[in-house]
Image (cartoon, grey):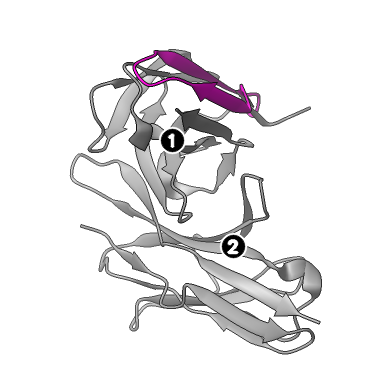
Amino acid sequence: DTAVSQTPKYLVTQMGNDKSIKCEQNLGHDTMYWYKQDSKKFLKIMFSYNNKELIINETVPNRFSPKSPDKAHLNLHINSLELGDSAVYFCASSHRQGRNEQFFGPGTRLTVL
Amino acid sequence: AQSVTQLDSQVPVFEEAPVELRCNYSSSVSVYLFWYVQYPNQGLQLLLKYLSGSTLVESINGFEAEFNKSQTSFHLRKPSVHISDTAEYFCAVSDKRTGGSYIPTFGRGTSLIVHP
């Protein structure tokens, strides 16, 4: 069983479109995260939810909106996609917020044309 | 704000040689420290962690790291590397911020390249 899964694995779309990435964890963790990894491998935290409550919202354009329907799911919706949004997006989960290790999904490679 | 510095963006080394990947952080409060490894086209995997207790922590595949509070460092070492250790290595630090949340901050990564 995959611990943290993301769909889709690849996403190619045109500028201006709206797209969503889904994430699910079956580890029973209370905290989930979204990260963006750019072409230079720099990993930047975007959002974090603890027990469905938003606890971290870093400087991210408001075109990005996370949604957590329950503790096991954290989806990312992106409106009006721009070229600069092209990156690999990772979902992760952990127990006890940042006081324990994170388990990462396989990533979603987003390419905006 | 918390910052994590990985001084070397790339470390080339020959197989069976020792290696050290450096990590320094800025927080002065209680911290939780992690090293993650990322193989090509994969997500990050935990390599080892320091939460409390012994300052020297080890992984199952021969890596070790030592928490040095006075130098605010958590360097990663391996006495003899293998070709299969070629990967990107990330240091991460979690500390308590205003409001009580623990927020992880990642370094920019070090690319370990092991040559035969």
Mark 1 is surrounded, within 10 Å at the Cα level, by few (under 14), some (14 to 19) or many (20 or more) other residues, namely many
Q: Quadrant of residue B30?
A: bottom left
List the residue tagged with mark 1: A86
Residue placed furthest toward the bottom: B17
Q: Using the numbered discs, state the Cα–Cα distance from disc 2 to disc 1 in whole angstroms.
A: 20 Å
Residue B55 is labelled as none
The chain letter for the residue carrying disc 2 is B
Residue B88 is labelled as 2
Q: Name the kind of residue labelled 1 in the image.
A: Ser
Please provide percent x and percent y for residue A91: 52, 33
Q: In terms of depth relative to the viewer, which is nearer, A22 or A73?
A: A22
Q: In terms of depth relative to the viewer, which is nearer, A109 or A5?
A: A109
Q: Is residue A76 above or below residue A95?
A: above
Mark 2 is surrounded, within 10 Å at the Cα level, by few (under 14), some (14 to 19) or many (20 or more) other residues, namely many
Q: Residue at x 66, y 74 (%)?
A: B113
Q: Quadrant of residue A79?
A: top left
Range of residues picked out in magenta? A7-27
Looking at the rendering, in which quadrant would you find the N terminus of chain A?
top right
Q: Is residue B26 above or below residue A32?
A: below
